Amino acid sequence: MLIFDIKIASGMENKTEIVICLGSSCFSRGNKTTVRLIDNWLKENRLRDKVYYHGNHCFANCDKGPVLKIDDTIHHHVDAEKAIQILKDYFGL
């Protein structure tokens, strides 16, 4: 039986994983705007090819949303301004 790591198989082993919650609670609290803002920020800072940026539906933290996860760290109550500051701090910009 062949077992492999999906990150290695997909070429993601060296990429930072950024996940934004797209559940209805987070989405209605502002993640609709934040999704585009993060994507634009990653492109402007030439980081898009260094990250695996995608949405997900549940972090089981609806009462703490909007939620943003970078690698294994979950950030709560993230608005657009806070998201950009989190990214700047993470990437040292």
Image (cartoon, rainbow, N blue to C red):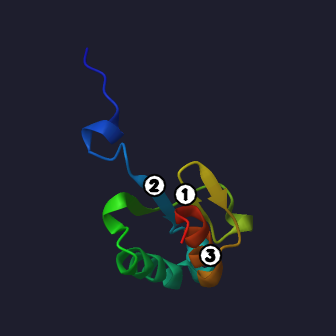
**Which residue is painted at 57% across and 77% down in the image?**
84
**Which residue is painted at 41% across and 63% down in the image?**
54
Q: Is mark 1 on a helix, strand or loop?
A: strand
Residue that carries the numbered disc 2 in the rendered image: 17
Q: Is residue 75 visible?
A: yes
Residue furthest to the top = 1
Pick whichever of labels 1 and 3 is earlier in the sequence: 1
Mark 2 and mark 1: Cα distance apart in space? 6 Å
Front of the two marks 3 and 2:
3
Residue type, mark 3 in image: Gln
Residue that carries the numbered disc 1 in the rendered image: 70
Q: Where is residue 6 in the image (x, y as percent from the top left)?
A: 33, 37
Q: What element carries label 3?
A: helix
Residue that carries the numbered disc 3 in the rendered image: 85
Front of the two marks 1 and 3:
3
Mark 3 and mark 2: Cα distance apart in space? 17 Å
